[in-house]
Amino acid sequence: MRNPADMVVRSSLEEMLESLQRRDEKPKDVPPALPNRPTSRGRLPSARRSLPVDFKVENAMSGTLSWSQEKETEETEAVLNCGIFGQNAKVVQEESPYAKLPELESYEERSEEDDVFHSSAALSDSAVRFNVNLRSGESGQNMNFVLKKKLRVWCHFPDTGWELGNVQSLSGQLANIFLSNGKISAVHVERLLPANPNILDGTDDLIQLSYLNEPSVLYSLKRRYADDMIYTKAGPVLVAVNPLKKVHICGSDFSGAYQHKTLDGPHVYAVADAAYSEMMRDGINQSVIISGESGAGKTETAKIAMQYLAALGGCSGIEQRLLHTNPILEAFGNAKTLRNDNASRFSRVVQRAKGERSYHIFYQLCAGAPLVLKDKFNLKSAHEYEYLKQSDCISISEVDDAQMFHVLMEAFDTVRICKEDQENAFAIIAALLWLGNVKFEVIDYEKHVQVIPDDGVKNAAKLMGCEVDQLMLALSTRTIQAGVDSIVQRLTLQQAMDTRDALAKSIYDSLFEWLVDQINISLEDGKRRAGRSISILDIYGFESFHNNRFEQFCINYTNERLQQYFNRHLFKLEQEEYTQDGIDWNNIDFIDNTECLNLFEKKPLGILCLLDEESNFAKATDLTLAIKFQKHLSSNPCFKLGMDGAFKILHYAGEVVYDTSGFLEKNRDPLYSDLVQLLQSCSCQLLRTITSHILNQSQRSTRPQWLNGADSQKQSVGTKFKAQMFRLMQRLENTTPHFIRCIKPNRKQLPGMFDNDVVLEQLRCCGVLEVVKISRSGYPTRITHQQFAERYGFLLLDNIDFQDPLSVSISILHQFNILPQMYQVGYTKLFFRSGQACLISVIY
Ligand SMILES: Nc1ncnc2c1ncn2[C@@H]1O[C@H](COP(=O)(O)OP(=O)(O)OP(=O)(O)O)[C@@H](O)[C@H]1O
């Protein structure tokens, strides 16, 4: 979908490329046409910072700089030594998932002294929250030009938002605008922004827009969306607007066309293809990072990317297995929420909001299990289970749970999970359903309870493979160690219900982890063969409900971390690299969410630490937690105390009010040793296998005195979650990222409805305009002088044997009359404008 007009525009770089192609035996692909770009930002090699006199590119490459300017040497050495370009010494000292840590386990087991060191470094970091006015993208000069030439403009009306019109006349500060609805309106010039010429309507890369402002970006996406063109490039990011209906842009015809390069327009296939090509070319692991709000289309996008990669591999054996992991992961990891019928979710086995469902597998099993299994598990319909019926939502419209169960069984077979394990996994799911039906009765004045010996506990015990009496005892009492003696204490009703629910959650978590392990084992073959990987990250999306609890807190923390990763790669590292290599560059501001992350992660006074601290007090309540937050966090601009123990966090994607009730209990999530022992004595082999790690943790655990007996988990849920987040970020850091930003077109989940405000809010939150600005004026293609000289040096007529790589590079650029606005010369690298990537592809 290349613009034919552009194909005749050729740069001298392309001409040089052509001479290389003639030299190469096998000609490479025709280079893409250069995009239009403003010439005003073209520069000659920077005069702002001169190259150090004794600077040697070779030395820089090996990490031992000989540099006379001491300060710069320190910074650059830190950068080169840590292996992550753009990371300066200050960043390394913070507690950061990007700092190179020897082993992940060592992060989790780091001593408190280490933590203090990290937190003090974090405290010294003066994170700045930039306020970006996205409307300020245009210069006054542009506007004057548009007014003078009576061109198309965007007019902002307080009630209706942006409307398109043509300037008719100007009188003082008022412009008469002929609006697209046929009316003429007098509008103050301050409420006008230049609109792009018709020819750019529906452009497939926002970088092409002559005028980059909010209404223009919105209009482009909307135009395309109306024609079912849901993908648009925003420089290096693919924007995907959820169609909420079937659109015919996927399937084998399309994927084949992308593989054979007969189609090259923006598409998830193009992103997956780029990841694959770069992996093969550079030998570096890649990642496709898919982000967006809940219901924005991340999971569907991830599936499309996986389908493409599977098709590249020929769709046999390992690829088939890869595709069949989806129904398994979705059955056990997805659930219906208020925003999305198939949301990837965080633990919700025992509790959820009205109108939402638990994980699909519970309903699928009840609806679709064959009779023999139904008999064996004594399975009833989903309506009969407390864990399922509590939220008044059993079915999803247009979803056949029974049929999905059959799809799941097929997937299990393809992924090679043996029949015995399959049946045992279903037995565990049934056991959890029965566990939810376990009831208690109060037996004394102190409200102690015993388990009612009905179907609930009997079926649960049978399916777990333990004695009914043992399970009843473990759910209603707790053994406390007092020196050498042990005392058995009866639980109160609340304690007993929490114990039952904690058991159900632990078993489900363990089962899910085990399934993921089985899938990884099944895919291991492919990994061993290739030695390289493409990770596709689809994570639960940002949520803001009327009532937000610990689950939303964890989900939104994850999204905040992911946003930081996005910012870091697309804004921070990119711009730092320009500055550190000494090229001329005016920084582009972006909304930095460091302050919000500090609010979560800072030690010792971030939310997660304070929550852990309070979780260790026996007498702590939701109210004491709220008071503690208020005392320590009120100076953070992202934190506000709400009413009745609630608190607000100003996230990058908007303000969310959290209800502290249940935070302490969910963070502790204790599994008492009686239950751990019970699990290990069960005759169900799979149950013993999947929960063995709980016993191992329990043996290493040190818990506060008052939680004596509740020693199964070394870390709180929040802290474990944070460690997982850091582990994920570290993994991603070792890949070349490709970003896809999913956008929800409206909040009603309706197809064909493009709500400007809803879309704009998401574009603002993720900084799409800034990404486009950076790519339009930035230098996405870069190559070291060394590599450039080695590759192209032969083209020079002079003898270059005794010249340094920098001089050779510059001579090549001059000999081929490369336009100065197309590149800048840095200390160690050449930086090329977008559209010059073809050159690099030939070099590697
Ligand atoms: N490319 C697409 N084509 C058709 N429908 C889509 C597409 N992408 C998303 N949808 C629709 O939108 C719904 C929500 O998408 P999806 O589950 O991928 O969202 P998500 O961003 O992963 O949400 P969460 O963060 O809650 O898991 C899907 O169930 C589907 O109906």
Image: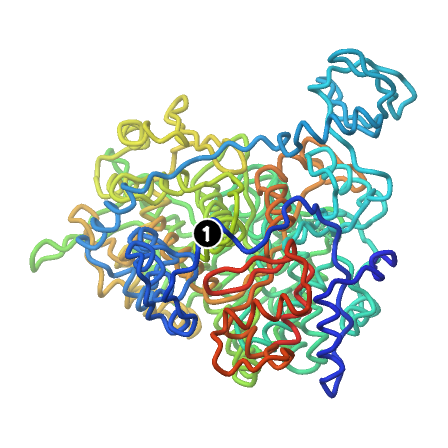
Q: Secondary structure at mark 1?
A: helix
- Using residue 484 as the reference point, say whether residue 110 is left or right of it: right
Q: Nearer the viewer, residue 657 or 704?
A: 657
Relative to 384, say whether 261 is above or below: below
Q: Nearer the viewer, residue 570 or 515?
A: 570
Residue 400 horizontal/vertical position (percent): 73, 55
Residue that protrudes farthest toward the bottom in the picture: 25
Residue at point 64% right, 58% down?
364
Relative to 693, say whether 249 is above or below: above
- Using residue 287 as the reference point, say whether residue 95 is left or right of it: left
**Location of residue 757 by image quarter:** top right
Picture mark count: 1
- Which amino acid, by three-letter code, is at mark 1? Thr
Residue 246 horizontal/vertical position (percent): 81, 53
Residue that protrudes farthest toward the right in the picture: 182
Report which residue position mark 1 lands on.
579
**Location of residue 101 by image quarter:** bottom left
Can residue 321 be spotted in the picture? Answer: yes
Residue at point 31% right, 43% down?
602
